[in-house]
Amino acid sequence: MFRKFFINCQEYIEKYNIHLINTLFLSFSLVIIALGALMITVESALPTFIRKTFRYGKHKCKDDEHSLANKLEVPKSWFAHFYIFAFGWSICAFYLVLKGMIMHSTAPDLVINFLDFIGGGKNERKVLIKSNEALIATLLMTLQCVRRFYETNFVQIFSRKNKINLSQYIVGYLHYFGSILALLVNTEGFVKDSTPSTFSFAKITLVQYICLALFHFSWSQQWKTNMIFVNLRKDSKTGKIHSEQHLLPRGGLFEMVSSPHMFFEIQMYVAIMGILPQSLTWKLIVIWVTGNQIVNALLTHKWYKENFKNYPKNRKAIIPFLL
């Protein structure tokens, strides 16, 4: 029964060239842009369910404590779960790309058939990403997933009171599931009748080297930013947790914006986009990530100003000097 359903879906996708990953991130982008704009401009006029879906953690919406939305909340610490998933999923992708380049072999038929299914059908999938670019991009994404796995499971201190909406929890899984597949769906060796090419540093362009530098800078600065959050809740002498309250962060780019970790997140995805200039899917991912980070940063900025009387007036929400 399931096999028949899968075949019917595959035939439908082939007939109408439905690109499931592009559809996913286009949908995410439209929702975050439309509802995010409403949250920023006319939040008070929106239904409580929508406000509770967007707000979480320190800027959680506290209206109607007995609403349906409250029953759909899970601990914010569950963020760690989809980083466990991303950790394993990204390593699998990197392994497949690296193995294909070393062995000069195409991906297994099971992988190619699955990518055909979620990538618009075998007749639509074309090679847009060279093996060199794919290896670099999957390595960068893997480094980010591994670091976030380590941070959320072994370093970050989550308040036991903070919650996130179940929809945000599910979106976290879908984001990493789709983002990592986006690195493979139009890559040499992962499209039928294509073979991986050999890796060469000579093939790396100046623009790609600049993108690598931008990623490295943003990746390391995001780590330092997250450590500032961690140290706010630890005793500097003993290293023990002394508070789960949200305190005023200082140092680093916090002196200029309220959410530097979100700013660096955007920069990392933009850097990968520079390495994959032909990928429409990754452009949609950047739009989604940028919109999501900006909306959350603006809500966070508003919360800081409401809860700290002497909050620095020169700080912007997410982009230094601009926003």
Image (cartoon, helix red, strand yellow):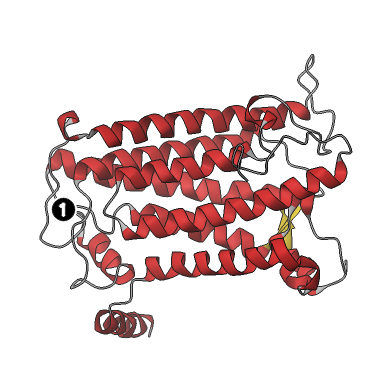
Task: Give the x, y percent position of residue 80.
Answer: 61, 46
Asked if residue 91 shows in the view, the reply is no
Residue located 58% across and 64% down the image: 32
* Within-10-Å neighbours for mark 1: few <14, some 14–19, many 20+: many
Residue located 64% across and 64% down the image: 37
Up-down: is 160 above or below 171?
above
Task: Give the x, y percent position of residue 254.
Answer: 68, 31
Up-down: is 48 above or below 234?
below
Residue 275: quadrant of the picture: top left
Q: Name the residue tied to disc 1.
A: 106
Q: How many marks?
A: 1
Figure quadrant of the N terminus: bottom left
Please tell me which residue lies in front, 318 or 201: 318
Task: Give the x, y percent position of residue 26.
Answer: 45, 67
Residue 70: quadrant of the picture: bottom right
Please tell me which residue lies in front, 263 or 69: 263
Q: Secondary structure at mark 1?
A: loop
Q: Residue furthest top?
A: 237
Specify whether 311 is left or right of 121. Answer: right
Up-down: is 189 above or below 274?
below
Kind of residue sitting beneath label 1: Thr
Specify whether 49 is left or right of 173. Answer: right
Up-down: is 294 above or below 204?
below
